[in-house]
């Protein structure tokens, strides 16, 4: 564990003309203050904080009852309040013109500020629309919306009625959406016609329609018009948000609920495979959200706060919607990604809106660090006082870059630790009081008493320089109360593993100064870019394939996403298909379809058998050690039924996967993404002559081919199409920059066409990101199903690729002929085999004009 300690930064010290931090001025002051929130002071602290922070329509007299033994904790039980009133009304009454939401749309230049007065009117109108649909106190309303400011309105409208919102991340598949809607028994869904993200269009309404084919209890769908493109609207079930809102009055009396009434259900991955609906109640959750924003982000009355997450995850719930609004400050809703239209987008947003706090994920920070400091330089980030990290432990190198390039060594860096189940941050530095160590979560928040236990005995590990599993001693207000419809699962997962404690599922250590470091999951959950994914859920998706007998999924360290998914499968004896790249892609598509693109394995291996105990249990820890290159640390293998399987697994891993299972790295909670494949993922494809398919005929691809990117120099893609299926209605081409992750539509042609012309000059002078040196673009071809849909007969696998690189002339002298380093020879005349195909062709493009005007 690192021992480098950074002192309190200049912007978090009093007397500098900036707001005085809420806590300070040193670590000792924090320790004294924290001691007054725990032990014998615990109840009095929480009671005082609740009364000062929230507006209670009905006062409480009991602070807390119950405990961990039965999972029956209750806070402020007699108290009555409304979340919407606390977030909006009290600020709208004081200052209706104050900005509540800063909305930064996906399209650069499209932004909007919504005042507290406007927000109150919009919330009330949507609440009245929902009321007209029969929604009442205690009902569950599902929300499947992109990142527009209307998502905040939807949250608060549901809460205003005393109903319960269940928000499903708009990247989940129709199957995952269906499962969550059915589980929580929603009758009403709020969605949009489409969404926008990173220049892409997301077919949200189409996904909802597909999910509702198996959700007979859903009676109404409220549809926000985001893009205006035509979508199917089922008469009597589907209604336009704007049309219905125009019919109702702009005020709705808030429903007063009990402090322990549910506020929302949020589904998170569990080790049993079935996603669990974590239930958060109103009073305690709101208190945790409000206090952590106030103290950890040191917000003050006129601050303009930004969390770059998605509202579909707990970070968005707590630190986009509830926490900032409960403090009456301006919160930012960011619809795009860190690299759209270029890798300066974050810093452009900070400069434009003069943001004071900035909260994102380590995945985004690592991606931007990799793309270079030049994307940060030149932007005025002086408004920032606090910058934060969320979702997973941040590595020291990324921490240092974030601190130096973004914070300019003047801002507090808060590396926060918490979970969906904790509701709000439980371990974090406090600006003005706690010196930071890169990679350390540091110390607990008010009223929280973390403890490190011996993993085997469950005994507390006292003192410093210890490592074990992380638990919490006593209940705190914002913690989850149960799993929806399955309280026993809540007890089994969090409270029974170590009786008397809340078990986080994470390993942790405490260094010689008492700083807490998080070591990662110790259960069967993989954290990919801050997304918690159940290994069992992914395994279940793989086993749905008719040919798969067994599956085992483990997490592997990844430089960009923190962890990535490594999947291992065995096939049934009766499986007659080929074990090749097509199978790998088919299995990967299966996971994408059942769960979502973010769950796609980075690597997928087909093996003869999996390591099992004599009782038949798969020993995933053995696979985990092998993929971590720790084969010399496999531990006790005496219970293995067949030790030779281990050698087979080692050999397969050394041999390398047949082909990449994922066409892009997973997007994080912040919206960051990075597409691409390594050289080891490119292989030749076995011929399957006679099946029919697509053969590229133009241009003549060799590894030394190049095209001048100059006006009028079009590139012609030609192909011949022979298929046993019907010709698709259309073919669409798009290009993905694998350095920035940006995706651009190149154009479409009719399904019967056999050529497509692309003008790179126009593409790169229309404001799209300029290529980096030797930057790789992937050209995808897909039919009218769209890039994220499974191909229908006659369609093409969505992630079929042509690869080429663009040459940046202002740094290097253009050559008549330039040989691409590490480029593979062209693979030509590859037919489509049913649903899977791959084209790996390398084109080298030399630019014939300066791209300077594409640069900022």
Image: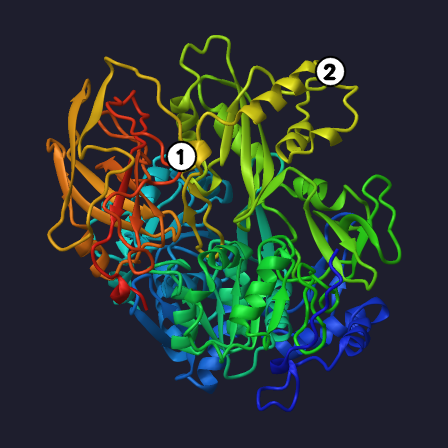
User: Which residue appears at 44% of the width and 28% of the height?
Assistant: 659
Q: Position of residue 74 (x, y in %)?
A: 70, 59
Distance from the alpha carbon under mark 2 to that under mark 1: 34 Å
Q: Residue at x 30, y 58 (%)?
A: 770
Q: Residue at x 38, y 23 (%)?
A: 582
Q: Is residue 413 visible?
A: yes
Q: Position of residue 342 (x, y in %)?
A: 35, 60
- Report how many numbered discs are placed on residues in the image: 2
Residue at the spot of label 1: 593
Q: Which residue is mark 2?
A: 614
Q: Quadrant of the N terminus?
A: bottom right
In the displayed structure, would residue 73 be above or below residue 804?
below
Instruction: Check contact, mark 2 vs mark 1: CB within 8 A.
Output: no
User: Residue 668 versus residue 761: which sits nearer the camera?
Assistant: 761
674 lies above or below 286: above
* Dot 2 alpha-carbon crowd within 10 angstroms: few under 14, some 14 to 19, many 20 or more: few
Q: Which image quadrant is residue 175 in?
A: top left
The answer to whether one can see residue 56 in this image is no
Helix, strand or loop at mark 2: loop
- Counting residues from the N terminus, which is met first, the one under dot 2 or under dot 1? 1
In this rendering, the answer to whether 688 lies above or below 557 is above
The percent position of residue 263, horizontal first and vertical second, equals 55, 59
Q: Nearer the viewer, residue 728 or 699?
A: 699
Give me the residue at 65% from left, 75% from top: 431
Residue 198, position as x, y percentages in the image: 34, 55
Could you say whether the residue bearing mark 1 is in a helix, strand or loop? helix
């Amino acid at each position: 564990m690192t021992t480098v300690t950074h002192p309190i930064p200049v912007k978090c010290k009093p007397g500098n003309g900036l707001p005085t931090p809420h806590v300070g001025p040193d670590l000792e002051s924090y320790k004294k203050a924290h001691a007054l929130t725990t032990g014998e002071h615990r109840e009095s602290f929480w009671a005082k904080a609740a009364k000062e922070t929230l507006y209670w329509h009905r006062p409480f007299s009991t602070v807390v009852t119950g405990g961990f033994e039965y999972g029956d904790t209750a806070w402020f039980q007699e108290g009555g309040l409304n979340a919407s009133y606390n977030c909006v009304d009290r600020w709208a009454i004081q200052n209706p013109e104050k900005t509540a939401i800063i909305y930064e749309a996906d399209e650069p230049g499209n932004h909007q500020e919504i005042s507290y007065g406007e927000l109150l009117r919009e919330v009330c109108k949507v609440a009245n629309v929902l009321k007209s649909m029969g929604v009442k106190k205690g009902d569950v309303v599902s929300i499947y919306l992109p990142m527009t400011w209307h998502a905040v309105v939807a949250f608060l409208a549901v809460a205003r009625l005393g109903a319960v919102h269940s928000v499903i991340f708009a990247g989940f598949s129709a199957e995952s959406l269906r499962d969550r809607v059915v589980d929580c028994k929603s009758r009403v869904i709020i969605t949009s016609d489409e969404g926008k993200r990173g220049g892409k269009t997301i077919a949200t309404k189409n996904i909802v329609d597909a999910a509702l084919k198996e959700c007979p209890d859903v009676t109404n769908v409220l549809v926000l018009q985001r893009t205006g493109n035509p979508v199917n609207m089922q008469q009597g079930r589907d209604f336009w948000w704007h049309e219905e809102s125009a019919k109702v009055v702009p005020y709705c009396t808030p429903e007063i609920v009990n402090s322990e009434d549910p506020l929302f259900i949020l589904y998170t991955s569990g080790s049993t495979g079935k996603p669990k609906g974590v239930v958060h109640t109103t009073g305690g959750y709101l208190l945790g959200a409000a206090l952590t924003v106030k103290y950890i982000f040191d917000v003050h009355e006129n601050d303009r706060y930004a969390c770059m997450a998605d509202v579909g995850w707990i970070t968005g719930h707590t630190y986009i919607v509830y926490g900032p609004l409960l403090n009456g400050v301006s919160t930012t809703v960011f619809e795009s990604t860190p690299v759209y239209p270029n890798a300066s987008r974050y810093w452009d947003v900070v400069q434009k809106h003069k943001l004071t706090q900035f909260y994102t994920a380590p995945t985004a920070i690592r991606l931007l660090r990799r793309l270079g400091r030049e994307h940060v330089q030149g932007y005025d980030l002086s408004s920032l006082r606090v910058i934060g990290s969320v979702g997973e432990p941040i590595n020291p190198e990324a921490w240092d870059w974030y601190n130096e390039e973004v914070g300019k060594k003047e801002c507090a860096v808060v590396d926060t630790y918490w979970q969906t189940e904790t509701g709000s941050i439980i371990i974090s530095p406090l600006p003005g009081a706690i010196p930071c160590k890169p990679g350390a979560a540091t110390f607990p928040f008010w009223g929280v008493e973390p403890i490190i236990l011996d993993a085997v005995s469950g005994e507390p590990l006292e003192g410093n320089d210890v490592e074990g599993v992380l638990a919490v001693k006593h209940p705190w207000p914002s913690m989850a109360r149960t799993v929806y419809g399955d309280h026993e699962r809540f007890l089994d997962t969090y409270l029974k593993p170590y009786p008397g404690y809340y078990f986080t599922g994470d390993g942790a250590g405490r260094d010689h100064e008492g700083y807490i470091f998080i070591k990662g999951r110790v259960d069967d959950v993989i954290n990919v870019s801050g997304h918690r994914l159940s290994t069992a859920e992914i395994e279940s998706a793989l086993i749905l394939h008719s040919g798969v007998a067994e599956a085992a999924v483990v997490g592997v360290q990844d430089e960009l996403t923190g962890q990535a998914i490594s999947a291992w499968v065995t096939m049934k004896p009766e499986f007659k298909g080929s074990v090749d790249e097509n199978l790998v892609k088919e299995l990967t598509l299966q996971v994408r379809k059942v769960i979502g693109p973010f769950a796609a394995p980075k690597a997928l291996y087909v093996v003869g058998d999996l390591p099992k105990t004599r009782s038949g249990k798969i020993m995933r820890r053995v696979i985990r050690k092998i993929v971590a290159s720790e084969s010399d640390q496999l531990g006790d293998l005496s219970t293995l039924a067949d030790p030779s399987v281990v050698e087979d697994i080692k050999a397969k891993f050394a041999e390398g996967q047949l082909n990449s299972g994922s066409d892009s790295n997973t997007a994080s909670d912040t919206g960051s993404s990075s597409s691409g494949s390594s050289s080891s993922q490119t292989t030749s494809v076995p011929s399957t002559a006679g099946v029919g398919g697509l053969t590229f005929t133009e241009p003549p691809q060799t590894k030394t081919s190049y095209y001048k990117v100059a006006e009028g120099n079009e590139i012609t893609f030609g192909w011949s199409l022979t298929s046993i299926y019907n010709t698709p209605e259309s073919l669409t081409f798009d290009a993905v920059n694998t350095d920035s992750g940006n995706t651009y539509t190149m154009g479409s042609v009719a399904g019967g066409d056999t050529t497509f012309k692309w003008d790179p000059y126009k593409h790169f002078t229309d404001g799209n990101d300029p290529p980096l040196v030797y930057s790789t673009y992937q050209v995808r071809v897909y039919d009218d199903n769209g890039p994220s849909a499974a191909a229908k007969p006659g369609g093409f696998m969505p992630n079929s690729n042509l690869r080429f690189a663009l040459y940046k002339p202002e740094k290097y002298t253009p050559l008549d002929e330039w040989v691409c380093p590490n480029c593979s020879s062209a693979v030509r005349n590859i037919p489509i085999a049913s649903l899977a195909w791959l084209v790996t062709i390398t084109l080298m493009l030399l630019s014939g004009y300066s791209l300077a005007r594409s640069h900022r």
